[in-house]
Image (cartoon, grey):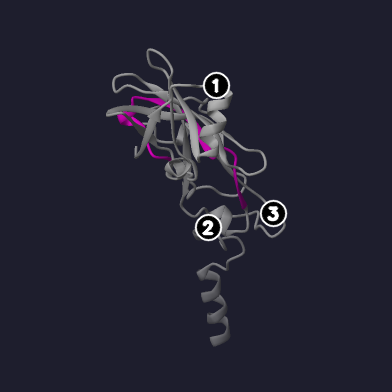
Amino acid sequence: MKSVSIQGSKRESVGKKATKALRNAGLVPCVVYGGDEPLHFSAPELAFKDLVYTPDAHTVEIELDGVTVLAILQDIQFHPVTDRILHIDFYQIFEGKEVTMNIPVHFVGNSKGVRNGGVLRKTNRVLRVKALPKNLPDYLEADITELKIGNKLYVGALASDGITIMHPDNTVVCQVRTSRTAIVDDEDEDEEGEEGDVPATETDDVAAVKED
């Protein structure tokens, strides 16, 4: 998994007054859980743009006074009006310890059902997985190539080497729904036109009669 580096400064005071002063200065108050004790720090709001404003998942390397802490984003709070980042919670991770986090799903392929006018409904765009930090994927790939109208793709069909997907195998990831313009009968093209064809032998007989 890709990693984002953030340089911050430890916070000595965590009161409301100090927190407000940080925000007024363009800094975001943060805390890292999961270690021996919570680690409070702050960093410029722009430092989080590659972590927050992206659909991809990342680990985070937080550099504080010469010490690097490896973590993942746990929770984030935004201002209800301005959408500015108010606070971020991180969770510290360790190389030999499994961690659980949300991973985005990338949909690939061009399904026959969609080509025939069906609509792809993405039921789960993000799935929760558990793995060692080194095995965490950037995304989970969902291949919709074989989906016809009415078909569903389940969690059990996704590749999960080195990770555990924390959802039942029968959880629906996406499905192809019918629409007003959809061709309901979307069987394979090589099967179309079989019914009603005139056998070659009958055609030959008609031609023979005309010659006589």
x and y, in percent, of residue 103 in the image: 46, 35
x, y percent for residue 18? 53, 27
Where residue 179 is drawn, which disc sits there?
3
Q: Is residue 171 visible?
A: no
Residue at left 54%, top 28%?
19
Answer yes or no: is residue 115 visible: yes
- Horizontally, is 210 left or right of 42 in the view? right
- Report the amino acid beneath label 3: Ser
Question: What is the C-alpha distance between the residues marked 3 and 1?
Answer: 55 Å
Instruction: Classify the position of the N terminus by image quarter.
Output: top left
Amino acid bearing label 2: Glu
For the residues labelled 2 and 1, the Cα–Cα distance comes to: 71 Å
Q: Name above or below for residue 66 compared with residue 5.
A: above
Q: Which residue is mark 2?
A: 191
Quick one: label 3, few (<14), some, or many (20+) residues within 10 Å?
some
The residue closer to the viewer here, 176 or 12, is 12
Report the Cα–Cα distance between label 2 and label 3.
23 Å
Observer-nearest of 61 and 122: 61
> Can you tell which of label 2 and label 1 is closer to the viewer?
1
Task: Please check the rendered image and state whether residue 55 is part of the magenta-colored stretch, yes or no.
Answer: no
Q: Position of residue 28 (x, y in %)?
A: 49, 35
Q: Residues within 10 Å of mark 1 (few under 14, many from 20)?
A: few
Q: Is residue 180 left or right of residue 156?
A: right
For residue 15, the mark is: 1
Given this view, does label 3 or label 1 mark the residue nearer the observer? 1
Near mark 2 (Cα within 10 A), the count class, few <14, some 14-19 or many ≥20, is few
